[in-house]
Image (tube, rainbow, N blue to C red):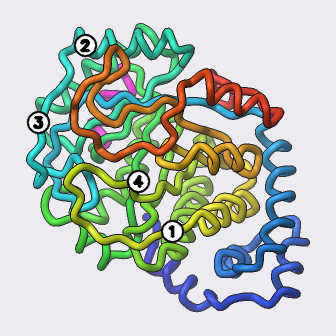
Amino acid sequence: MFNFEEIARLYEENKSKPSREEAIEILNKEDLSDKDYIKLLNCDALDILEVAARKAKRLTEAYFGKNIFLYIPLYISNYCSSGCIYCGYSCFNKIERRRLSLDEVEDEMLAIKRKGFNSILLLTGEDDTKEGFEYLKSAIKIAKKHFPEIFIETGPLSFEGYKELVDEGLVGVTLYQETYDLNTYEAVHLIGRKRNFVKRLNAIEEAIRAGVKEVNIGCLLGLSNDFKKDVFLTAMHGKYLLKKYPKIELSISFPRIRPFEGMNFIYTKVDDLQFVKFIVYTRLLLKHVGINISTRESKELRDNLIGLGVTKMSAESKTGVGGYVKDNPSPKQFEVSDDRKVEEIIMSIKLKGYNAEFTNWVML
């Protein structure tokens, strides 16, 4: 089990801001230690970040080439059993709940396929019911007819649950811990199974043991006041998983909280500069790990981060149920910031001198 408490202590013991000379010495190293990473996360010097960004660019191209993998989320249900105060799908929110019919699921997938995507990410609320699991299983069966790669972002499942889905064609799992600070975690998850911090922490390993080939972990920036600590713990969680399961493909995400209809939650703002730091310095630490950036972020920021560590980008995301066949008034889990069409994002990637890819060549 990932010992988050021991890693948190390591952070607290080493989180002092480095001198300029110390930061330069760290950047000159071929490999960063965990303590080096902590120091950089607490370094605010822009000239240091500029040097680090150039190094991050070289490393990203060395390990991933000049390629950006594009993916798209399909929300198939907004039923949720958990009370998370930062989420538009929370069971506390009085919104219309619906699941796409299986015919609608296939129609949405065909619309996504026509946009050029060669993989699918299926999302639901934290639906803990047997009905919800069987529905997800049926959706994966449909997806298998159209996509070689199927990923899910749902509530945590048991080993047996993940194994059933792997047998149907599931390839990857996204599961964010949200925050690694236990006190914050308990404060923002009021009811439901998601309130169980340890079960959620261990679930990603259940998925790997069940045969999932790719996993994506992350923290939701802004939940914890000490968001740098959350970033550090996310990266350390990733290192732990790679050491224990060296054959998996690992990606990391640092999504920032976005507003949703009826939002009544005060969170810690994480500015663009901090966000860029997290991407760049994480690339220096984890050279061959994928780094995702979603449409939560602005088009300007996303474009400027191409090549500086980011390897995967979502495109033309809809965060309500369905929405690719035709626009619908379904409540959104959160508001997107980059609402460009896929073609526009592809053009921006090409203008940066990179290739937009719809096939995950690492998996092949």
How far across and down, in percent of the image, does residue 40 sit? Answer: 71, 76
- Between the C-alphas of marks 1 and 2, the distance is 37 Å
Label 4 close to label 1 by CB (< 8 Å): no
Q: Residues within 10 Å of mark 3 (few under 14, many from 20)?
A: few
Residue located 22% across and 14% down the image: 102
Q: CA distance from mark 4 to mark 2?
A: 27 Å
Q: Which quarter of the figure is the C terminus placed in?
A: top right
Residue 305 pos. (x, y %): 70, 49
Identify the amino acid type marked 4. Answer: Tyr
Which residue position holds label 3? 96
Q: Are marks 4 and 3 in contact (CB under 8 Å)?
A: no
**Amino acid type at image mark 1:** Val
The N terminus sits in image quarter: bottom left
**Three-letter amino acid code of the residue under disc 3:** Glu
SS category of the residue bearing label 1: loop
- Badge 4 or badge 3: first in the primary sequence: 3
Residue indicated by mark 4: 176
Magenta stretch: residue 221 in it?
no
Label 2 and label 3: CA atoms lie apart by 17 Å
Magenta segment boundaries in residue numbering: 158-168
Mark 4, Cα crowd under 10 Å, few <14 / some 14-19 / many 20+, is: many
Q: Is residue 136 above or below residue 264?
A: above
| Chain-order first, disc 2 or disc 3 | 3
Q: CA distance from mark 4 to mark 1?
A: 18 Å
